[in-house]
Amino acid sequence: MTRIAACLAWLSIVATACGNASPYTTGSASRDGIGKFYEGREIAQVMGHRGASWLERAGREREERTDLLINNLALAADASVADIGAGTGYFAIPLARRVPDGRVLAVDIQPEMLAIIEQRARIAKITNIERILASEADPGLPQGAVDLVLMVDAYHEFSHPFEVMQAVAESLNEGGRVVIVEYRGEDPSVMIKPLHKMTAAQVKREMAKVGLRWITTESYLPQQHVMTFKKR
């Protein structure tokens, strides 16, 4: 073993001992995945901005009862809400109307999606949406300032879920909540590609890695879990 190789091996051992080893593993990518695994789950490919029309499809409210989700979030008028993976603003727009004295942080890694939100907000005369262009590992949220972080059918596509959720946990104010909505991975009748669904057990396991405590799992939506977490 060369001196360089020996040094690299030693650094690897030290990093592991100090808890700095990567939380991810890699392997062969499946058809809908990226070949990167977290807590035994392969991370799904991101739906690009060219799929924006699917987010705004006419039957979405009927199929997913998105109206029930918004009504059950129990938001104060002055709440600060972050919508991560905001896409076209499907949720950011109505959320902004629910918090007229607060603000909605519309977070996405695709500038094309944020441009769509800007246009929609301008047409709707909504001024309390702040668009944030995130990186894959950092949502760009202010620390200790957010009442609710919402992620709808987005978390399973995060390429750096550990780092993103660490930042999300740090963004919460006292009593702040994280609400994760994902298609039910336990339910074979939910006709969604397997990598685009998650089981409740998997979500709990991944949130625990960043110190988020499970509060409730609600099943009032036809196809999705609604899972709430808070900081420990």
Image (cartoon, grey):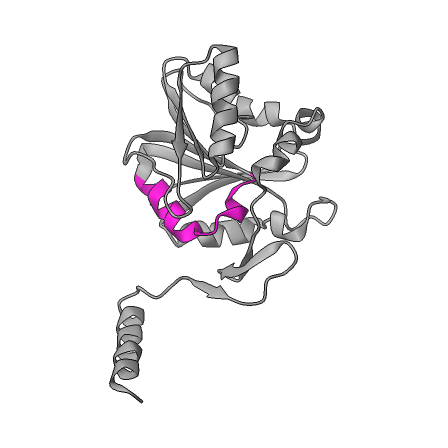
Q: Quarter of the image holding residue 75? A: top left
Query: Which residue does the image show at 69% across and 45% down from the upper left?
Result: 192
Q: Quarter of the image holding residue 181? A: top right
Residue pushed farthest bottom? 1
Closer to the camera in the image, 173 or 165: 165
For the question of whether residue 231 can be seen, the reply is: no
Closer to the camera in the image, 185 or 141: 141
**Residue 73, relative to residue 5: is it above or below?**
above
Closer to the camera in the image, 51 or 41: 51
**Residue 124, relative to residue 151: is it above or below?**
above
Query: Which residue does the image show at 32% across and 37% down from the upper left?
Result: 171
Query: Which residue does the image show at 47% across and 51% down from the upper left?
Result: 159
The number of discs equals 0
**Residue 57, relative to residue 209: is it above or below?**
above
Left or right of residue 228, residue 185 in this image: right
For the question of whether residue 62 can be seen, the reply is: yes
Q: Position of residue 62 (x, y in %)?
A: 70, 25
Closer to the camera in the image, 57 or 145: 57
Left or right of residue 187, residue 163 in this image: left
Q: Position of residue 189 (x, y in %)?
A: 74, 45
User: Does the magenta portion include 165?
Assistant: yes
- Secondary structure of the magenta portion, mostly? helix
The quarter in which the N terminus is drawn is: bottom left
User: Does the magenta portion include 47?
Assistant: no
Query: Which residue does the image show at 40% across and 39% down from the upper left?
Result: 134
**Residue 159, relative to residue 39: is it above or below?**
above
Q: Position of residue 119 (x, y in %)?
A: 50, 19
- The magenta-colored residue range is 153-170
Residue pushed farthest top? 125
The quarter in which the C terminus is drawn is: top left
Q: Position of residue 166 (x, y in %)?
A: 35, 47
